[in-house]
Image: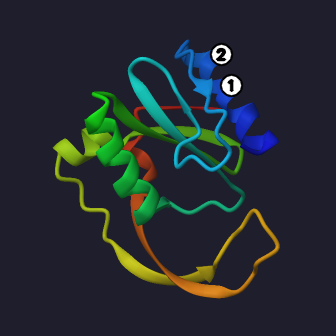
């Protein structure tokens, strides 16, 4: 987990008292968990009215959350504002992520800037379960 994501995790725990603990396995598909939730954390620097979620993270974490009887939450900081989405709840509501193939960098955290197509969905920022600065 990057330092920016650690800061977001700390702020979420401070604001909501979730006691999410960072996962120590560097290559896990989620960033933190507690007895009720698994959490994926993203830091987006550009504002869009809908935030993006990659299908591979969505599908793995949705299935893993079911397996361990937890909810999957997606925590995103966009332009300084932190949004929390309960993906498990959105799925129960049959939320339409409008999945589509988008050409983007293969990796954003590493030096591999080659372009590839990724299947991504979009979540309206207004569908959040909590938000704060």
Asked if residue 51 is positioned above or below residue 35 in the image, the reply reads below
Please give the residue where the numbered disc 2 appears in the rendered image: 14
Q: Which residue is mark 1?
A: 11
The answer to which quarter of the image holds residue 31 is: top right
Q: Residue at x 48, y 20 (%)?
A: 34
Q: Residue at x 57, y 86 (%)?
A: 116
Q: Residue at x 56, y 22 (%)?
A: 20
- Asked if residue 33 is positioned above or below residue 27 in the image, the reply reads above
Q: Residues within 10 Å of mark 2 (few under 14, many from 20)?
A: few
Spot occupied by residue 52 in the image (x, y as percentages of width and height): 49, 62
Name the one closer to the observer, 118 or 132: 118
Judge whether 56 appears above or below 14 on screen.
below
- For the N terminus, the image quarter is top right
Q: Does the CB distance between marks 1 and 2 fall below 8 Å?
A: yes
The percent coordinates of residue 79 (x first, y second) are 70, 51
- Left or right: 133 in relation to 58: right
Using residue 108 as the reference point, say whether residue 50 is left or right of it: left
Q: Position of residue 85 (x, y in %)?
A: 42, 40
Which label was assigned to residue 74? none
């Amino acid at each position: 987990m990057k330092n920016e994501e650690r800061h977001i995790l700390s702020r979420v725990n401070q604001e909501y008292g979730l006691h999410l603990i960072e996962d120590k396995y560097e290559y896990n598909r989620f960033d933190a968990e507690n007895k009720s939730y698994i959490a994926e954390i993203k830091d987006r620097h550009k504002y869009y009215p809908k935030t993006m979620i990659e299908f591979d993270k969505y599908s793995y974490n949705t299935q893993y959350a079911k397996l361990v009887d937890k909810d999957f939450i997606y925590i995103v900081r966009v332009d300084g504002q932190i949004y929390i989405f309960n993906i498990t709840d959105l799925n129960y509501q049959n939320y339409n992520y409008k999945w589509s193939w988008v050409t983007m960098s293969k990796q954003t955290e590493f030096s591999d800037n080659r372009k590839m197509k990724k299947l991504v969905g979009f979540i309206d920022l207004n569908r959040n379960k909590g938000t704060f600065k």
